[in-house]
Image: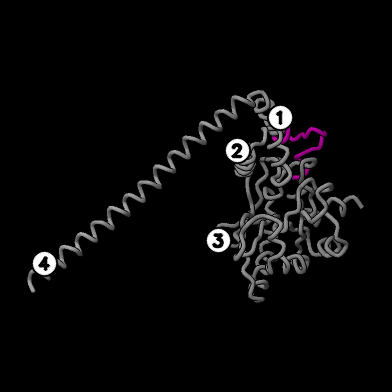
Amino acid sequence: MRIDNSRARFLKKYEQRLKKVLVVGFAAGLLVCFMLNLVFNRIRIGGIDKKYKKQITELTEKNEKLSSQIKSGVSKKNTDAGASADGLSSKEDSWSLVLINEENPLDTAYIPELEAVREGAFVDVRIVEDAKKMLEDAEKEGLNMYIVSAHRDYETQREVFNTTMTEWISQGSTPLEAYEETKKSVAVPGTSEHASGLAMDITSGQYGELDEKQAETDEAKWLAANCWKYGFILRYPLDKSDVTGIVFEPWHYRYVGKDAAKEIMEKDITLEEYLSN
């Protein structure tokens, strides 16, 4: 009996040690794969940098020129970037209708007065009540709204833009191609509505991908049908990229005020079209 018990204890200890070895070995394997991946990516990106050095230099100069123009208050079409900031700071009701895009940049020095609509997500203090009410009413309907992004400053926008552009390059695009593709889904730094504090990217808590399938979620359908009641519009609708310059984004909502939102959503037009009429 003692021999059997001793053998059982020995086998149990052996089994435990074997499991530890296997776990450590598996973890070590993952670490090695991760490190190798970093090395290969560094080599690959380094090769891309050398191959497209001229294009990268041109893009860098282009971005630096645009950034300096925006920071100095003048865009490439002599639009006063400071005017957007002045409009957003205005006491007039028109502050909610300020147009921000590549043709109408926002002064990078502009910082709205912010308040949390949810933990970690901040919007202009003037829209926080409407934003909270919209999310609360959606949750009462059993929906799970997730704020991917709200206010983003200039530097954060630049990081998002550069990261997206790098992803395109890693997939085989040239830097020029990557730049043009990135512009379709990520606003060039200094031209993003997120810097105004009036925009939110909202997805379903069950489906967080930023793609067209987001429009098929219950959360996106509810927002598209009800956002105007709270002063918001779907900023980049389907088949309107020729007007907005941005592809269909069923998650990007912009505050414009309740009256304007009602008309824009009823007529199925963009903010650009509304302001041009």
| Residue identifier under label 1 | 62
**Marks 1/3: CA distance?**
36 Å
User: Is 191 placed left or right of 35 in the picture?
Assistant: right
Name the residue type under label 2: Ser
Residue for point 25% across, 56% down = 18
Badge nearest the viewer, 2 or 3: 2
**Marks 4/1: CA distance?**
76 Å
Badge nearest the viewer, 2 or 1: 2
Label 1, secondary structure: give it: helix
Name the residue type under label 4: Ser
Q: Earlier in the sequence, mark 3 or mark 4?
A: 4
Residue for point 35% across, 46% down = 28
Name the residue type under label 3: Glu
Badge nearest the viewer, 1 or 3: 1
| Residue identifier under label 3 | 119
- The 10 Å Cα crowd at callout 4, few under 14, some 14 to 19, many 20 or more, is few
| Residue identifier under label 4 | 6
| Residue identifier under label 2 | 170
Label 2, secondary structure: give it: helix
| 266 w.r.t. 112: above or below | below
Q: Nearer the viewer, residue 80 or 23?
A: 23
Q: Earlier in the sequence, mark 2 or mark 3?
A: 3
Residue 161 placement: quadrant: top right
Q: Nearer the viewer, residue 254 or 50?
A: 50
Badge nearest the viewer, 2 or 4: 4
Q: Is residue 155 visible?
A: no
Magenta range: 68-86
Indicate the position of residue 158 as horizontal and vertical percent values: 63, 40
